[in-house]
Image: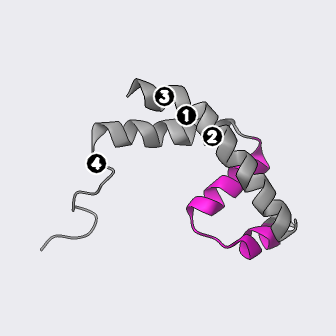
Amino acid sequence: DVSPQTQPSHTDSPRDGEIINALHCAIRKLPKIDASLALMHLDDLSYREMSEVLGISENHVGVKLNRIRKQLAEDLKGVVDEL
């Protein structure tokens, strides 16, 4: 009997692990609200749910997530290129 926790996943390669670690480090460097938004987005919360948690409009959530994505892409550019 194989449980889902013991099955290999697509993130089991060393390269994927390094990318995930780099992503977590980049998220930790963001301002707290931005880091919270990034993590909620990774947890598949809706814009409405994120806006309720943070007390900002859904539109503002979208704007902030776009900026966060651009920032993380920039932060990870060198890391991913090295792998």
> Is residue 59 found left or right of 36 in the rendered image?
right
Q: Residues within 10 Å of mark 1 (few under 14, many from 20)?
A: some
- Which is more foreground, mark 3 or mark 4? 3
Residue found 16% across the figure and 70% down from its top: 2
What secondary structure is marked by label 1? helix
Span of residues in magenta: 31-53
Name the amino acid type tagged 1: Leu
Name the amino acid type tagged 2: Leu
Q: Earlier in the sequence, mark 3 or mark 4?
A: 4
Is the N terminus in the top left, top right, bottom left or bottom right quadrant? Answer: bottom left
Q: Earlier in the sequence, mark 2 or mark 3?
A: 2
- Residue 9 lies, with reference to residue 46, above or below; the image says above
* Residue at image mark 1: 76
Q: Main secondary structure of the magenta part?
A: helix
* Residue at image mark 2: 72
Asked whether the beta carbons under mark 3 and mark 1 sit within 8 Å of each other, the answer is yes
- Is 58 or 17 nearer to us in this picture? 58
* Residue at image mark 4: 12
| Residue 54 quadrant | bottom right
Residue found 28% across the figure and 64% down from its top: 5
* Residue at image mark 3: 79
Q: How far, Cα to Cα, is label 3 from label 1?
A: 5 Å
